[in-house]
């Protein structure tokens, strides 16, 4: 199972998150939790979890500040920010630092399951080939994940994937739903948005070219999806990142 650490200065919110059975159902175990961001930083350095969920607004130290310090200390875990509606517009620095995604309060099980599914898929993709183990109980799904990550800009569909792996689309839907807690379409959108963010941060390619490299032939549709996902335009994201 993947490990996760949760930080929130509100004890009741923290308790509710830690006790949520969705974490275990989606393949995550709680490595630790803390209401104090300074104590959390020390514990995260020691425990090296795969993922950190952290509240955005905390006394004396924001979740993004904590992430910045951990990144400077060499932390390679994924970060998910939890914020109230309207706060996140102030935190694009989170994505510049390589943050994974955000959750709006109150956290719904639907949104939590979606994020956990994408996190599991990303961790699985990073681990592919590093050691001879399965990252999900399904070897078929592991192979599909690796293929999709290596060919993010191609035109993928359930039909093309079912043809490539000689299986039916309903079975593929079940794999993504059962093991990642996300639909195939939802997984591909998250994967493409991550790729777009990396290209905006790390290259000087124009936005239209990046849209094409991420599998979007319609530039305006790409911009709409990006804005919905990151709460800002691709251009604003790049300006903040640089």
Image: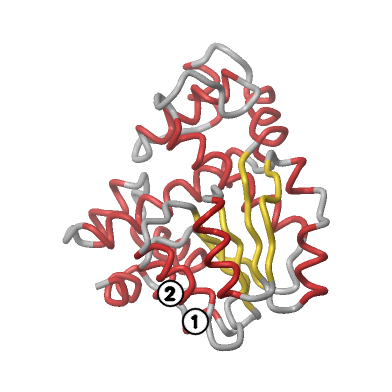
Which colour scheme appears in the figure? secondary structure
Looking at this view, is 93 or 192 the one in front? 93
Secondary structure under tag 1 reads helix
Secondary structure under tag 2 reads loop
Above/below status of 29 relative to 223? above
Going 42% across and 56% down the picture, which residue do you hit? 75
Residue 141 position in % (x across, y down): 57, 25
Residue 48 position in % (x across, y down): 52, 50
Residue 104 position in % (x across, y down): 65, 71
Quarter occupied by residue 27: top right
Q: What residue did someone put label 1 on?
A: 89
- Count of numbered labels shown in the rendering: 2
Q: What residue did someone put label 2 on?
A: 232
Going 66% across and 28% down the picture, which residue do you hit? 175
Q: Is residue 30 left or right of residue 210?
A: right
Going 56% across and 47% down the picture, which residue do you hit? 119
Looking at this view, is 3 or 189 the one in front? 3
Quadrant the C terminus occupies:
bottom left
Looking at this view, is 178 or 205 the one in front? 178
Going 62% across and 73% down the picture, which residue do you hit? 55
State the residue lying farthest toward the top: 166
Q: Are marks 2 and 1 in contact (CB under 8 Å)?
A: yes
Q: Earlier in the sequence, mark 2 or mark 1?
A: 1
Q: Residues within 10 Å of mark 2 (few under 14, many from 20)?
A: some
State the residue lying farthest toward the bottom: 60
State the residue lying farthest toward the left: 204
Q: Is residue 135 left or right of residue 240?
A: right
């Amino acid at each position: 199972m993947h490990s996760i650490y949760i930080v929130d200065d509100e004890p009741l919110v923290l308790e509710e998150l830690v006790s949520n059975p969705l974490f275990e159902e989606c393949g995550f175990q709680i490595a630790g939790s803390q209401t104090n961001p300074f104590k959390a930083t020390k514990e995260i350095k020691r425990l090296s979890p795969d993922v950190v969920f952290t509240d955005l607004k905390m006394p004396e130290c924001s979740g993004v500040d904590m992430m910045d310090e951990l990144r400077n200390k060499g932390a390679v875990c994924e970060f998910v920010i939890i914020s109230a509606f309207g706060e996140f517009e102030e935190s694009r620095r989170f994505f510049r630092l390589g943050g994974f995604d955000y959750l709006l309060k109150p956290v719904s099980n639907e949104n939590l399951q979606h994020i956990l599914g994408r996190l599991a898929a990303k961790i699985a993709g990073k681990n592919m080939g590093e050691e001879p183990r399965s990252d999900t109980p399904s070897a078929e799904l592991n192979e599909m994940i690796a293929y999709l990550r290596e060919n993010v800009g191609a035109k993928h569909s359930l039909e093309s994937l079912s043809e490539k792996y000689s299986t039916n689309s309903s079975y593929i839907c079940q794999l993504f739903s059962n093991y990642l807690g996300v639909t195939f379409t939802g997984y591909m959108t998250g994967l493409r948005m991550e790729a777009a963010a990396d290209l905006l941060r790390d290259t000087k390619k124009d936005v239209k070219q990046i849209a094409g490299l991420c599998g979007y032939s319609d530039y305006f549709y790409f911009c709409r999806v990006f804005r919905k996902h990151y709460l800002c335009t691709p251009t604003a994201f790049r300006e903040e990142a640089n």
